[in-house]
Amino acid sequence: MNGQNRKDITPGLAVNIVLKADQRTGKLTSGIVKDLLTKSSNHPHGIKVRLTDGQVGRVQEILNK
């Protein structure tokens, strides 16, 4: 699943995100969602989230549902 729809993403979900610094390379970072930062119901580049370790980025893949 991609991370473009806010309804698909909930706290506690394992995801791959792309950090702002890694947007050019597309390097993914794995983690567990702590907070959803995007307010709109969808976003073409992925919903912005904060992981439990404090990193912020846009969801590229949802690893478990």
Image (spheres, rainbow, N blue to C red):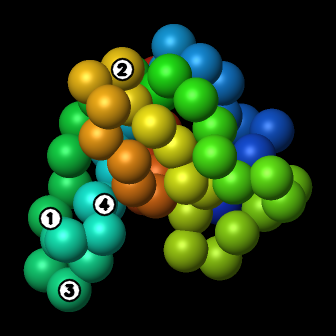
Residue 18 is marked as 4
Q: Could you tell me if the residues under marks 4 and 3 are in contact, i.e. CB atoms within 8 Å? A: no
10 Å neighbourhood of mark 1: few (<14), some, or many (≥20)?
Answer: few
Which element is circle 3 on? loop
Using the image, determine if residue 56 lies above or below residue 32: below
Instruction: Kindly indicate the quadrant of the structure image that contains residue 24.
Output: bottom left
Closer to us: mark 3 or mark 2? Answer: 2
Look at the numbered disc 1 and give the secondary structure of its residue: loop
Residue 5 left/right relative to 58: right
Tag shown at residue 27: 1
As measured in the structure, the alpha-carbon distance from the residue carrying label 4 to the one carrying label 3 is 10 Å
User: The C terminus lies in which quarter of the figure?
Assistant: top right
Mark 4 or 1, nearer chain start: 4
Labelled disc at residue 52: 2
Q: Can residue 9 be seen in this view?
A: yes
State whether residue 5 appears in this view. no
Q: Residue at 50% across / 22% down in the picture? A: 34
Please state the horizontal and vertical placement of residue 50, each as a whole percent of the image. Answer: 45, 37
**Spatial separation of the CA atoms under disc 3 and disc 2:** 24 Å
